Image (tube, rainbow, N blue to C red):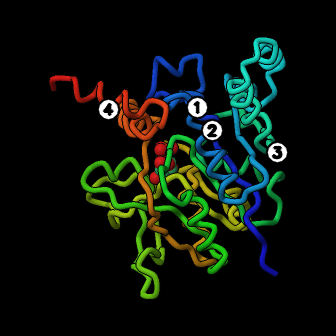
Amino acid sequence: MTKKVRKAVFPAAGLGTRFLPATKAIPKEMLALVDKPIIQYGVEEALAAGCEEIIIVTGRGKSAIEDHFDISFELEATLERRGKKELLALSRQVSNMVKLAYVRQKEAMGLGHAVLMARELIGDEPFAVILPDDVIDAPVPCLKQMIDVYNQTQSSILATMEVDGPAISAYGVLEGTPDSTNPKLFNVTGMVEKPKLADAPSKNAIIGRYILTPKIFELLEKTPLGAGGELQLTDGIKALLATEKVYGYTFDGIRHDAGDKFGMLKATVDFALKREDMGEKFREYLKSLSL
Ligand code: G1P
């Protein structure tokens, strides 16, 4: 019997050291891209892809994420009293969004460990993983594209894009061959987390969107610590290859690394230019700069 992808896991327990000092007291997932926390873009993507349940893996100092997706009684009562209908709708849109569950990762032991924390809440069904740092701007939401592929293949799918040069060392990297029937698919035969450029098996970097079969949990339980002394999701998926098919999927869309200062700046410019309420004004401002 085939099962649908209904649940999405958001690992959000990381320390956010790439964005210090902003992330000293604020979770990096709550940093605003224009006016919306980056994790909300991911949650909206999961909903648009048909997911019904969101599981956020949090840790110490991350309670702002829970507050963000909750009802804010004081704020909403004040907005109502002042007749601020549009702002009230914006606030409620978040709290009404979806069924959310939180699970706590007590120690920052890596992405594989974070995903393992969601085991009980996922159970025996395929699920999605979204890394909130990776904001993907796409005509069809990236996760929706991947779920469509999953529905055809019933196999684990990893989002991938080509990365040139030494930057590849910041990623999990796929080994394998292009699929002969679909140019967007890559038949994965191996993978390595954060290799040196010379050791990278290809230019196909893993981007933060995954669809995984539940078999991954028992494998992650047995996976030894890997790169950076952490339990790596990449190593768990590599073990999955012994018994299951795994595909890389070249998505349509632009990926922004919003967990990085420069990546966030670029994303801000792109997203602000596209906004109906400020795009034109912002374009004029950028043009006026004598660069
Ligand atoms: C994680 C994964 C890595 C993947 C990357 C995508 O790394 O471990 O395989 O390529 O996300 O953003 P991180 O960026 O958390 O170090």
Does mark 1's beta carbon lie closer than 8 Å to ligand 1? Answer: no
Q: In 3D space, how far apart are the residues under numbered discs 3 and 4 (Cα atoms)?
A: 38 Å
Q: Quadrant of the C terminus?
A: top left
* Residue 283 tag number: 4
- Marks 3 and 2, the one that precedes in the sequence: 2
Which amino acid type corresponds to the residue marked 4 in the rendered image? Answer: Arg
Select label 1 or label 4 by which is in front: 4
Q: In 3D space, how far apart are the residues under numbered discs 1 and 4 (Cα atoms)?
A: 23 Å
**How far from the left and from the top, in percent, is residue 250?**
44, 67
Query: Residue lying furthest left in this view?
Result: 290
Which amino acid type corresponds to the residue marked 3 in the rendered image? Answer: Lys
Q: Nearer the viewer, residue 208 or 188?
A: 208
Rendered view: 225 above or below 281: below
**How far from the left and from the top, in percent, is residue 224?**
59, 54
Dots 1, 2 in contact, CB < 8 A: yes
**How far from the left and from the top, in percent, is residue 85?**
73, 24
* Residue 76 tag number: none
